[in-house]
Image (tube, rainbow, N blue to C red):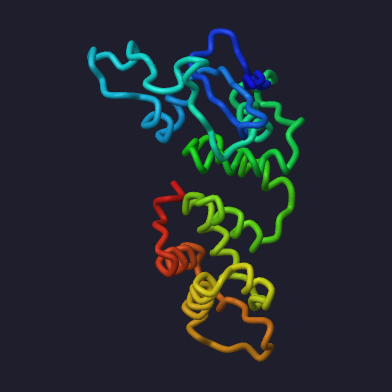
Amino acid sequence: MPPQKGRYYIRGGDLFQLTGEQVEQFLFRIHSYFFLRDSSFWKTELDGPITSGNRDEEPLQIGNSAATPYILNDENAADFARFLSVIYNRKYGDFSRADPGDWVVIFRLAAKWDFPEIQALAVEHLQIHEMELVEQIQFYRDNQADGRYLLPLYVELASRDEMLGLDEARILGTETFVLVQQARERLRGQASSSDPMQNPLPPGIQRADIMTIVSETFDIPLASLL
């Protein structure tokens, strides 16, 4: 059974991508320009060795026809269309039609395929919708997000007065839980509080010092935030 045309089957597109399982496949025809420009992953995947000395004149080495599409084995048509809706957004800067579930998918694919600008856009929209702190950490880790997204969350977790709860510890996992505890102790000089569930930071501690201690504990360079 031939594949159906996906939502984004665009006249003039030079990159053909196939999603879905054998029983229901969708063929997309899009522009490689955006993928080559914005993603180091796709630049490696689609660009072959240069033979003419001019990369812009070289044909795609894969996915260059409907007969030989690039196959996205692990992705379905709906999720891929959500991702492409950012690139082919008809209302410049207006993403009001995308809901939190859409941005979760968009972020996942942007992280997977190394689209840093789309990652940042997804984070901007996800922050509008409240998500528990440890859930954000789990989400970013599950999607192998860059340290610049995780470090501020670890800083917040290590800085807050409240001790980590049991449910939070389960979500974070043993390694991250231990690192958070280590950062909390370093920030407080291992001082204990009279309230077993509250342990505020010592007065006068500077934000820069907090960032440095947490970044060292988690081995995430502060430069990642730049």
Q: Quadrant of residue 8?
A: top right
Indicate whether 35 appears above or below 103: above
Residue located 61% across and 44% down the image: 123
Q: Position of residue 183 (x, y in %)?
A: 49, 74
Residue 76 screen position, x and y as percent: 64, 35
Along the viewing direction, whichever of 53 and 64 lies nearer the viewer: 64
Side of 44 where 190 appears, left or right = right
Residue ID at (69%, 88%)? 195
Residue with the most extreme top position: 12
Depicted 99 relative to depicted 6: above or below:
below
| Near-viewer residue (127 or 69) | 69
Residue at 61%, 54% (x, y): give it: 139
- 51 lies left or right of 146: left
Q: Position of residue 68 (x, y in %)?
A: 47, 20
Q: Is residue 47 left or right of residue 107?
A: left
Q: Which one is nearer the viewer's eye here, 13 or 185?
A: 13
Query: Would you place residue 29 above or below residue 196 in this image?
Result: above
Task: Tell whether 149 sits left or right of 128.
Answer: left
* Quarter of the image where one finds residue 218: bottom left
Q: What is the residue that sits farthest to the bottom in this orientation? A: 194
Query: Which image quadrant: the N terminus?
Result: top right
Q: Position of residue 91 (x, y in %)?
A: 70, 20
Q: How many circles with numbers are drawn on the protein?
A: 0
Q: Residue at x 39, y 57 (%)?
A: 221
Quick check: 145 above or below 73? below
